[in-house]
Protein backbone atom coordinates (compact mmCIF):
# COMPACT_ATOMS: atom_id res chain seq x y z
CA UNK A 1 0.00 0.00 0.00
CA UNK A 2 1.55 3.27 -1.12
CA UNK A 3 1.19 6.33 1.07
CA UNK A 4 1.28 9.78 -0.46
CA UNK A 5 3.32 11.86 2.01
CA UNK A 6 2.23 15.16 0.46
CA UNK A 7 -1.42 14.21 0.95
CA UNK A 8 -0.71 12.97 4.47
CA UNK A 9 1.03 16.25 5.31
CA UNK A 10 -1.79 18.30 3.83
CA UNK A 11 -4.36 16.32 5.83
CA UNK A 12 -2.28 16.85 8.96
CA UNK A 13 -2.14 20.59 8.33
CA UNK A 14 -5.89 20.72 7.80
CA UNK A 15 -6.53 18.77 11.01
CA UNK A 16 -4.17 20.97 13.02
CA UNK A 17 -5.77 24.14 11.64
CA UNK A 18 -9.17 22.87 12.80
CA UNK A 19 -7.67 22.30 16.25
CA UNK A 20 -6.18 25.81 16.24
CA UNK A 21 -9.55 27.25 15.32
CA UNK A 22 -11.31 25.33 18.12
CA UNK A 23 -8.75 26.38 20.73
CA UNK A 24 -8.97 30.01 19.63
CA UNK A 25 -12.75 29.82 19.80
CA UNK A 26 -12.54 28.47 23.37
CA UNK A 27 -10.30 31.37 24.37
CA UNK A 28 -12.61 33.89 22.72
CA UNK A 29 -15.61 32.43 24.55
CA UNK A 30 -13.80 32.68 27.88
CA UNK A 31 -13.29 36.40 27.34
CA UNK A 32 -16.93 37.08 26.54
CA UNK A 33 -18.52 38.51 29.64
CA UNK A 34 -22.02 37.61 30.67
CA UNK A 35 -24.85 40.00 29.85
CA UNK A 36 -24.88 41.46 33.38
CA UNK A 37 -22.22 43.99 32.35
CA UNK A 38 -19.83 43.03 35.15
CA UNK A 39 -16.09 43.25 34.93
CA UNK A 40 -14.34 40.98 32.47
CA UNK A 41 -11.76 39.59 34.90
CA UNK A 42 -11.27 35.86 34.34
CA UNK A 43 -12.67 33.59 37.00
CA UNK A 44 -10.41 30.95 38.62
CA UNK A 45 -12.03 28.06 36.75
CA UNK A 46 -11.71 30.12 33.57
CA UNK A 47 -7.96 30.35 34.16
CA UNK A 48 -7.66 26.57 33.98
CA UNK A 49 -9.62 26.56 30.75
CA UNK A 50 -7.53 29.43 29.43
CA UNK A 51 -4.29 27.59 30.23
CA UNK A 52 -5.55 24.44 28.59
CA UNK A 53 -6.64 26.34 25.49
CA UNK A 54 -3.34 28.21 25.24
CA UNK A 55 -1.44 24.93 25.48
CA UNK A 56 -3.69 23.51 22.77
CA UNK A 57 -2.88 26.51 20.57
CA UNK A 58 0.84 25.83 20.94
CA UNK A 59 0.44 22.08 20.32
CA UNK A 60 -1.62 22.60 17.17
CA UNK A 61 0.82 25.26 15.99
CA UNK A 62 3.65 22.74 16.31
CA UNK A 63 1.56 20.17 14.45
CA UNK A 64 1.14 22.58 11.56
CA UNK A 65 4.89 23.22 11.51
CA UNK A 66 5.68 19.51 11.59
CA UNK A 67 3.28 18.73 8.75
CA UNK A 68 4.68 21.58 6.67
CA UNK A 69 8.10 19.97 7.07
CA UNK A 70 6.63 16.64 5.90
CA UNK A 71 5.26 18.29 2.77
CA UNK A 72 8.59 20.06 2.13
CA UNK A 73 10.56 16.83 2.52
CA UNK A 74 8.19 14.94 0.22
CA UNK A 75 8.40 17.73 -2.35
CA UNK A 76 12.21 17.69 -2.24
CA UNK A 77 12.29 13.90 -2.57
CA UNK A 78 9.88 13.96 -5.49
CA UNK A 79 11.97 16.65 -7.17
CA UNK A 80 15.13 14.60 -6.63
CA UNK A 81 13.52 11.47 -8.06
CA UNK A 82 12.26 13.33 -11.09
CA UNK A 83 15.70 14.81 -11.68
CA UNK A 84 17.39 11.41 -11.39
CA UNK A 85 14.98 9.31 -13.42
CA UNK A 86 13.63 11.77 -15.99
Image (cartoon, rainbow, N blue to C red):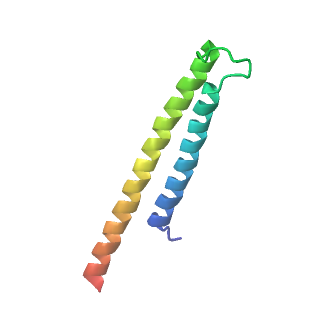
The C terminus lies in which quarter of the figure?
bottom left
How many marks the image carries: the answer is 0
Image point (60%, 24%), residue name: 49
Image point (58%, 48%), residue name: 18
Quick check: 2 above or below 60?
below
User: Which residue reaches farthest left?
Assistant: 84
User: Which residue reaches farthest bottom?
Assistant: 86
Quick check: 53 above or below 72?
above
Q: Position of residue 56 (x, y in %)?
A: 53, 35
Q: Position of residue 83 (x, y in %)?
A: 26, 80
User: Which residue reaches farthest front?
Assistant: 37
Q: Nearer the viewer, residue 51 or 6?
A: 51
Q: Position of residue 75 (x, y in %)?
A: 36, 67
Image point (53%, 49%), residue name: 17
Q: Nearer the viewer, residue 75 or 32?
A: 32
Q: On the image, which quarter does residue 76 sit in?
A: bottom left
Image point (51%, 54%), residue name: 12
Image-based side of 83 in relation to 13, left or right: left
Q: Position of residue 74 (x, y in %)?
A: 37, 65
Amino acid sequence: MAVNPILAGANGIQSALKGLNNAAQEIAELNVDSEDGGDSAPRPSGLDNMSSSLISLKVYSRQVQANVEVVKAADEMLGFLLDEFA
